Amino acid sequence: MKALVFAAGLGERMRPLTLHTPKPLLSVAGKPLIVWHLERLAAIGVREVVVNIAWLAECFAPTLGDGSRWGLTLHFVHEGDTPLETGGGILNALPVLGGQPFLVVNGDIWTDFDFATLPREPAGQAHLVMVDNPAQHPHGDYRLDADGLLHHDREGACLTYAGIGIYRPSIVAEWQETIGDAPGSECTPPRFSVVPLQKHFMARGQVTGQHHRGRWTDVGTVERLQALDAELAANG
């Protein structure tokens, strides 16, 4: 299985830290956020990782090299000056990801989630990891039912999408029909979020999920980065 790490974001809420360092390369407990992911991906047998890049793209290769130190091959896919968002990022990376299901992880989260608990391929179009709602996102995203299906109807308590999942390449096959004329869809390459696609296939019972009850942080602000660093340092 290949993996895609989303690392193209502008990191605007993290400035001034991200003026010269892209957010996935910011360090916690002595190593960049993205390296925590690379180590865990290598541990479950992933051998090729696609890293989509845009903001400060030139920083990644000098910091990470070719991936060989982790037993990986890294493929850096440059999206240009403007990130293509999650859906556009998947579509743009497909020539490197190939035709098989792939693992996706946001480069700006930290978690103790064990990637080995993910299915090798989703039952439908996608399988997403959900977490308890953090303080900054109290209402969550999707509802996980007793059968492991995800829903966006909000007819019950929702959990937050962790930014980790297994996707089939076909999730973006008909993106134009789902996205319509949303801003960015007219660009070349197109820029769009994967969220409408997730909801589209949830409505058809084709998105499953699992609830991770361990540690997870969306490192979206300087304060959360500092808190995570302090927590990891205190816990060794």
Image (cartoon, rainbow, N blue to C red):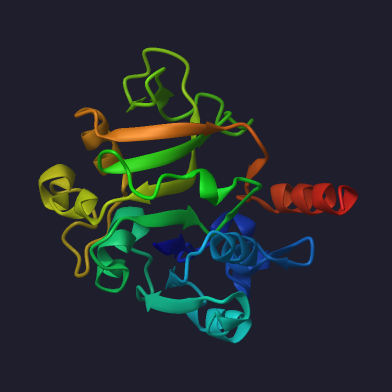
Report which quarter residue 6 is drawn in. Answer: bottom left
Report which quarter residue 143 is drawn in. Answer: top left
Between 60 and 121, the one lying in front of the other is: 121
Relative to residue 214, is residue 177 depicted above or below?
below
Q: Residue at x 63, y 58 (%)?
A: 14
Residue projecting furthest to the top: 155
Residue 187 % position (x, y)? 20, 65
Residue 216 % position (x, y)? 64, 42
Residue projecting furthest to the left: 177
Residue 30 % position (x, y)? 79, 67
Between 157 and 38, the one lying in front of the other is: 38
Count of numbered circles on the image: 0
Relative to residue 206, is residue 187 depicted above or below?
below
Residue 99 % position (x, y)? 23, 63
Q: Residue at x 21, y 35 (%)?
A: 200
Q: Residue at x 41, y 40 (%)?
A: 128
Q: Residue at x 54, y 59 (%)?
A: 44
Q: Is residue 235 left or right of residue 195?
A: right
Q: Is residue 64 left or right of residue 103?
A: right
Relative to residue 146, is residue 185 depicted above or below?
below
Q: Is residue 28 left or right of residue 161?
A: right
Image quarter of the N terminus: bottom left
